[in-house]
Image: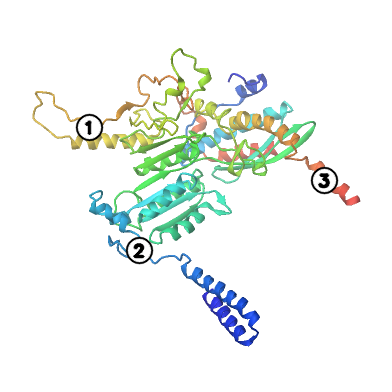
Amino acid sequence: MEGWDPNTKSTLTKIPLLTTKAGPRDGAAWTQRLKEEYKSLIAYTGMNKSNDNDWFRISAANPEGTRWTGKCWYVHNLLKYEFDLQFDIPVTYPATAPELELPELDGKTHKMYRGGKICLTVHFKPLWAKNCPRFGIAHALCLGLAPWLAAEVPILVDSGMIKHKDDTAAATASSLQF
Amino acid sequence: MEAELKGLMNDLEALKRAIPNRSHQDSIAKMQRRAEQLVDLANSAPSRRCKVKDMSAEVVDSNPYSRLMALQRMGIVENYERIREFSVAIVGIGGVGSVAAEMLTRCGIGRLLLYDYDTVGMTKTDAAVQTLADINPDVVLESYTMNITTVEGFETFMASLTNKNFSTSKSGSGVDLVLSCVDNYEARMVVNQACNELNQTWMESGVSEDAVSGHIQLLVPGETACFACAPPLVRVDERTLKREGVCAASLPTTMGYNALKDYFPTMEMKPNPQCSNSACLERQMEAEASSLAQCPVHEDNEWNISVVADSNVESTAVHGSSGALPAGLVHELPRADEFTSSPVTEEASTSVEDLEELRRQLEALNAD
């Protein structure tokens, strides 16, 4: 954990760890794991809200809890940039981490694999492997997605690859006047 | 096209007769010659050949298998045509998978199952099926466009590997070999999981990021290390290696093929008795049981004679007791810290309703 900022470190220590090593093909054990995932997500979301650092919404998209969808956002130069967020729980979970996808950014940055899967190889995969099975979805968001957004969104904005939604609306409005 | 060209030839002939002016005759004759060339081109255009019922060794230009069947005469294979009974599953139809698929197709493999979720204007697997069917219509091709790491994709993957419609006589799974030609750790772990569960022999492949090195690994569940037994190794940044007299670049001991140096070391890896994959441990138990059953039994062995494999490959136990790696190499991913599952608490035994309650709590937080 060297090189991580103190805020992330202190947040991380407060996200409840998981104990059940089970994937989506493990029946009742997966249900137990899913409960732990929820508890840790609830604690993390609540913590973010009370620290005025709310930055994502995530919900299971199916009853089995194997597909998750939601939103995440990042504030850069006082403007909020929001993206769809989605991922599947892989069959080899938790030995392998979920591959977090931001489909709207697919093709806009090199720090991404096909389909908008963000690159987690260097900064997150070793941590996940070391902490298996104690890390869950909440840890993947905190240590995988959050630093990725902090590193990539400013570059995407400054290089003009993404525009703020008001910016686009203003541009359309001004073009209508002429 | 043939009919169109014939029509064009007739029109030109009619035009020639209708225009008596000799000055135009030459240009019409020129157009006729061009049209004739087009007819020749059309006739020589490649067309998909018919399927071949039996492979023949006869050397005639209509027999695509004569050179392959010659392998029999040369004593390389006993019965080449048996290749038509074999099924190979190829996971990942990219730089490695598409070439493997083409080579097997040209060899006349019986059946190929192709898996990829990516697209190249059309799905990669459909594009491959089109190309491969043109190359050799005898091969049975199955196209699976899906991501095998998802629960749904994995179920389809397993079902397709166990489908025995092609060769009902075979024992085991419905394929003879699985080739992993994927580009990421997650997919490799999924192929490993499937093959361990099905006791299916497979081959893993990979190309380094600079495209001049690579590796090939044969995995026989229970008998050799599985992909989870031996986690991937990476060479540490050479600049961080500053030991006197040791050049990090000369340490490709376990890294596989190095094209720049044309160096291709081989090694044998025994399965890891502490492998994290439970299906692998089951296969290891079975392999041990069957090897004990196969041992020749002698009443006594006064001179301690034992049978040793006639092979020059090194045999290496996977980070078993010592865990020491050669200088310059590290595990790509760290091993999980010691973890002992905590005793089952009261909440573990409560029912699924709690799950609903937790879901509601998260949604409540999400709502505002």
Q: Alpha-carbon neighbours of circle 1 within 10 Å: few (<14), some, or many (≥20)?
A: few
Specify the quadrant that holds the N terminus of chain B: bottom right
Q: Nearer the viewer, residue B231 or B367?
A: B231
Q: CA distance from mark 2 to mark 1?
A: 45 Å
Q: Secondary structure at mark 2?
A: loop
Q: To which quarter of the image does residue B221 belong?
A: top left
> Where's residue B102, x and y in %?
43, 52
For disc 1, the chain is: B
Q: Residue at x 22, y 35 (%)?
A: B291
Mark 3 and 2 residues: CB-CB less than 8 Å, in contact?
no
Q: Amino acid at mark 1?
A: Ala
Q: Residue furthest front?
A: B22
Number of the label disc, if any, that sits on residue B334: none
Q: Amino acid at mark 3?
A: Ala
- Which tag is nearer the camera, tag 2 or tag 1? 2
Mark 3 and 1 residues: CB-CB less than 8 Å, in contact?
no
Q: Alpha-carbon neighbours of circle 3 within 10 Å: few (<14), some, or many (≥20)?
A: few
Q: Residue furthest top?
A: B244
Q: Residue at x 45, y 32 (%)?
A: B260
For disc 2, the chain is: B
Residue to which mark 1 is pinned: B309
Q: Amino acid at mark 2?
A: Asp
Residue to which mark 2 is pinned: B61
Q: Earlier in the sequence, mark 2 or mark 1?
A: 2
Q: Is residue B210 above or below residue B158?
A: above
Q: Secondary structure at mark 1?
A: loop
Q: Nearer the viewer, residue B24 or B14?
A: B24
> Where's residue A134, x and y in %?
52, 27
Residue to which mark 3 is pinned: A169
